[in-house]
C-alpha cells in the first residue's frame, strides 16, 4: 500500500502545483508615455482676411472755409503673406505684408461744394513679434502703411492722392491643423497727410483708421 499512497500524493502535489501556475496573474507591459511635439510657427504662410474699417478724414479746405471732419467707414477685404521664425524660448519673429481694398463710397458736402469718393486700396509692410502657446500665437505688429484716395469735386474735376504713414496692432493666430490657421487682427493706421489738387481748389487731408479683421491662412 505504501507505494500506492506515495504515487497518489505525488500526483496530487503535481496537480496543485499546476493549478497554482494557472492562477498566477500574467504580467502585462506598461504602456510608455507618448510625448507630443509642440507646434512650430516657423515657415512661410499666406491667407485672406476681411472685416471693417473706421476711417476718420480731416480736410483743410482753401483759406476762408472751415475745416471738416468726415468718416470714411466701410468693409475691408484683402490678402496677407509673411514668414516667421520660432525660437527655443517660444518667441516668434516675422515679417508680414498685406494688400486690402476698402469698400466705401462717401459723399461730403462743404460750404464750397460737394465731394464723392474715398480711400480704395491700402497696404502695409510690418514686423511681427509674438509668443507661442503651442498652437496659439499672440502677436504685436508695427510698420509702414499706405493708402490711395480717389475723389471727385462735383462739377469741377477729379483727383487722386497717396498717403504714407505707420500702422500698429495686435492679434491672435490659432493653428486649426498643421497647415491651416485662423486669425483675428486689430490695427490702428495713421496714413499721414497729403493734398487733393482739384485745379480750382486744393484741399489738405489727414487720414487715420481702426480696423478689425478675421482671416484664414495656410502655412507652407
Image: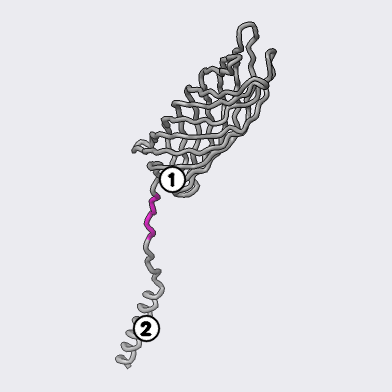
Q: Distance of mark 2 from mark 1, alpha carbons? A: 73 Å
Residue 31 lies within the magenta run? yes
Residue 42 lies within the magenta run? no
Mark toward the start of the polypeptide (2 vs 1)? 2
Residue at the farthest left position: 3
Q: Residue 131, position in %: x, y?
A: 42, 34
The dot on residue 203 is none
| Region rendered in magenta | 30-36
Residue drawn at x 34%, y 82% is 14
Q: Residue 24, position in %: x, y?
A: 39, 71
The dot on residue 219 is 1
User: 190 above or below 44?
Assistant: above
Determine which residue is flagged by label 2. Answer: 12
Scheme of image coloration? one colour
User: 62 above or below 53?
Assistant: above
What is the magenta segment's predominant secondary structure?
loop
In front of the other: 115 or 9: 115
Q: Locate residue 141: give its quadrant.
A: top left
In front of the other: 172 or 205: 205
Image quarter where the N terminus lies is bottom left
User: 65 above or below 119?
Assistant: above
Which one is closest to the eye, mark 2 or mark 1?
Answer: 1
Amino acid at each position: 500500500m505504501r507505494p500506492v499512497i506515495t504515487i497518489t500524493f505525488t500526483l496530487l502535489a503535481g496537480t496543485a502545483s499546476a493549478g497554482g501556475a494557472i492562477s498566477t496573474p500574467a504580467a502585462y507591459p506598461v504602456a510608455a508615455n507618448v510625448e507630443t511635439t509642440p507646434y512650430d510657427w516657423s515657415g512661410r504662410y499666406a491667407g485672406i482676411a476681411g472685416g471693417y474699417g473706421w476711417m476718420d478724414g480731416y480736410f483743410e479746405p482753401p483759406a476762408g472755409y472751415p475745416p471738416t471732419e468726415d468718416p470714411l467707414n466701410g468693409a475691408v477685404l484683402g490678402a496677407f503673406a509673411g514668414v516667421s521664425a520660432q525660437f527655443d524660448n517660444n518667441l516668434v519673429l516675422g515679417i508680414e505684408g498685406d494688400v486690402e481694398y476698402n469698400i466705401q463710397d462717401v459723399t461730403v458736402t462743404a460750404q464750397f461744394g460737394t465731394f464723392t469718393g474715398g480711400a480704395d486700396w491700402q497696404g502695409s509692410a510690418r514686423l511681427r513679434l509674438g509668443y507661442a502657446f503651442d498652437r496659439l500665437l499672440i502677436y504685436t505688429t508695427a510698420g509702414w502703411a499706405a493708402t490711395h484716395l480717389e475723389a471727385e469735386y462735383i462739377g469741377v474735376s477729379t483727383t487722386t492722392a497717396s498717403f504714407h504713414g505707420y500702422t500698429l496692432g495686435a492679434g491672435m493666430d490659432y493653428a486649426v491643423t498643421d497647415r491651416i490657421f485662423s486669425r483675428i487682427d486689430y490695427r490702428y493706421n495713421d496714413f499721414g497727410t497729403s493734398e487733393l489738387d482739384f485745379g480750382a481748389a486744393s484741399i489738405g487731408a489727414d487720414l487715420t483708421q481702426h480696423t478689425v479683421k478675421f482671416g484664414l491662412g495656410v502655412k507652407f
